[in-house]
Amino acid sequence: MHQKIKIMKAFKNLTFLALLFFMSFGNSQAQGPSGNQAYSIHEDVVLPSKVGEYEKTLKEFMDNIKKYNIPDAKWITTQTNDFRYLFVQPIPNMAELDNNNLGRLTRKDGRRQPYRSF
């Protein structure tokens, strides 16, 4: 019977140590960088008859981004077969969605509504 008590205490101690080990491992992972990246995705659906006008506006927009040196205007653009244009931009957090990224270009360009297609 005395041997059984020793085994139970050893099992209890081992369980406690294992629990402590796994809890400390979880905390160390949570404090480091998460490895997750948030993205802002903008989609424009363009009528087939308006593709030329839309792409002309995009070219003007890109020329103005370069002309007025907007350094943080970086994104990936893709076009689908059904005339959808997707703009994907990494963002540091969800609060970045509240920022008016086109506002900086509007102030530098001097237009009230610079790009009606957007």
Image (cartoon, rainbow, N blue to C red):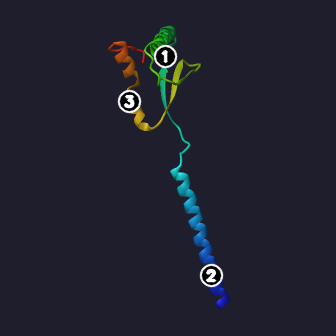
Query: Which badge, 2 or 1, comes first in the chain's sequence?
Result: 2
- How crowded is the residue under tag 2: few (<14 C-alpha within 10 Å), some, or many (20+)? few
Residue in the image at 58% along x and 21% along y: 80
Q: Secondary structure at mark 3?
A: loop
Q: Secondary structure at mark 1?
A: loop
Tell me the kind of residue under disc 1.
Answer: Val
Q: Position of residue 75 (x, y in %)?
A: 52, 25
Q: Is residue 6 left or right of residue 112?
A: right
Is the N terminus in the top left, top right, bottom left or bottom right quadrant?
bottom right
Label drawn at residue 99:
3
Residue in the image at 62% along x and 86% along y: 5
Q: Is residue 18 above or below residue 2?
A: above
Label 3 to label 1: alpha-carbon separation = 25 Å
Return the residue found at the far bottom. Answer: 1
Query: Which badge, 3 or 2, comes first in the chain's sequence?
Result: 2
Q: Nearer the viewer, residue 61 or 28?
A: 28
The quadrant where residue 79 appears = top right
Residue in the image at 59% along x and 70% along y: 17
Q: Position of residue 18 (x, y in %)?
A: 61, 67
Is the C terminus in the top left, top right, bottom left or bottom right quadrant?
top left
Query: Which badge, 3 or 1, comes first in the chain's sequence?
Result: 1
Q: Nearer the viewer, residue 106 or 56?
A: 106
Label 2 to label 1: alpha-carbon separation = 71 Å
| Residue that carries the numbered disc 1 in the rendered image | 46
Q: Nearer the viewer, residue 20 or 56?
A: 20
- How crowded is the residue under tag 3: few (<14 C-alpha within 10 Å), some, or many (20+)? few
| Residue that carries the numbered disc 2 in the rendered image | 8
